[in-house]
Image (tube, rainbow, N blue to C red):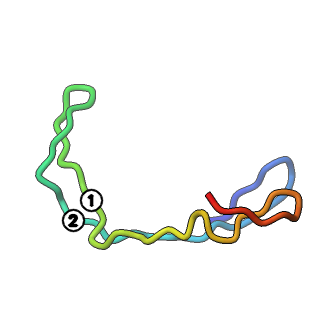
Amino acid sequence: MKLSFLGQVYSTANNSVETIPSEYTARFLGRTYTLRRPVQTVNSTCGIGKKYRGVAYGA
C-alpha cells in the first residue's frame, strides 16, 4: 500500500500475526465479537541494548 504524508510518498510493510479465537467475547455498539489471540506469543527484546545519549544502560 502506498501512502503519502506532507508530499512524501512511502510504502508500508504488511506484517501479519496469525490469530485464533479466544473464549472471551466483547460487545461494541450493540454487536458481540469473539476476541482473538495470537497463536504464538512474540518475545520482545526490550531492555537490551538501550542507549541514552550514547551511554548504555539496563532497565
Quadrant (top left/top right/bottom left/bottom right) for the C terminus: bottom right
* x then y, percent, for residue 2: 68, 64
Viewer-closest of 56 and 29: 56
Q: Which residue reaches farthest top?
A: 29
Residue at 27%, 26% in the rendered image: 29
Q: Count numbered badges in the picture.
A: 2
Residue at 11%, 52% in the rendered image: 23
The residue identified by callout 2 is 20
The residue identified by callout 1 is 37
Q: In this view, does 29 lie to the left or right of 53?
A: left
Q: Whole-Å distance between the Cαs marked 2 and 1?
A: 6 Å
Viewer-closest of 37 and 52: 52
Amino acid type at circle 2 is Ile
Q: Is residue 50 left or right of residue 41?
A: right
Instruction: State yes or no: discs 2 and 1 in contact (Cβ < 8 Å).
Output: yes
Quadrant (top left/top right/bottom left/bottom right) for the N terminus: bottom right
Residue at 31%, 73% in the rendered image: 40
- Estimate how packed mark 2 is, as few (under 14), some (14 to 19) or many (20 or more) residues with alpha carbons within 10 Å: few
Position of residue 29 relative to residue 51, above or below, is: above
